[in-house]
Amino acid sequence: MRLVFDACALIACLRDETGAEVVESLLLNPHNTCLVHAINLCEVYYDFLRVSNKATAQSAISDLMATGLIRREDMDSAFCQKVGKLKANHHLSLADCFAIALSNQMHSELVSSDHHEFEPIANSGICPIRFFR
């Protein structure tokens, strides 16, 4: 199964928050192809940098990549237009729009805990969302 992870899912896993075991299980399942857009990975990095230091932030990213998580850097014109359309039409952060666009492009589910942002997206059929908590 293909899965795209948003920053809150990855941060929850790294910080052992509620639902971390679900995210970890998805990341470590050899039958899953786990993806993250570079923009969402940047969110993880700056979150750890803000509350800790550069070494901790770099270690967090290294730990994620060690699971086999695949970093995507899709930024071609068509992809950016999809991101822009999502941002223009929905109350979402730009980073969330990147996660949704990548999920749609890869025909995958988006893993998140952010019900407020993503329930309207799931309910409207824009993108399948797997809420881990």
Image (tube, grey):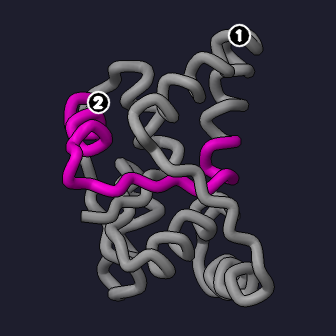
Q: Is 130 placed above or below 89 here?
A: above
The residue at 47%/42% (across/down) is 8
From mark 1 to mark 2, how far is it between C-alphas? 22 Å
Q: Does the magenta stretch include residue 27?
A: yes
Instruction: Give the left or right position of residue 126, taking residue 85 as reference.
Output: left
Q: Does the magenta stretch include residue 52?
A: no
For label 2, the crowd category at 10 Å Cα-Cα, with few meaning under 14, some 14 to 19 and many 20 or more, is some
Numbered range of the magenta stretch: 20-42
> Does the image show residue 132?
yes
The residue at 64%/22% (across/down) is 48
**Residue 54 image point, x, y percent:** 76, 14
Q: Is 105 placed above or below 21 here?
A: below
**Residue 93 image point, x, y percent:** 65, 61
> Does the image show residue 133?
no
Quarter where residue 59 is shown: top right
Q: In which quarter of the image is the N terminus?
A: bottom left
Q: Is 104 placed above or below 17 here?
A: below
- Amino acid at circle 2: Ala
Mark 1 or mark 2: which is in front? Answer: 1
Q: Mark 2 points at which residue?
A: 20
Instruction: Give the left or right position of residue 79, taking residue 64 as reference.
Output: right
The residue at 71%/10% (across/down) is 55
**Residue 127 image point, x, y percent:** 39, 78
Secondary structure state at the residue bearing disc 1: helix
Q: Name the residue under label 1.
A: 55
**Residue 88 image point, x, y percent:** 70, 84
Secondary structure state at the residue bearing disc 2: helix
- Name the N-terminal-most of marks 1 and 2: 2
Q: Quadrant of the C terminus?
A: top left
Quarter where residue 90 is shown: bottom right
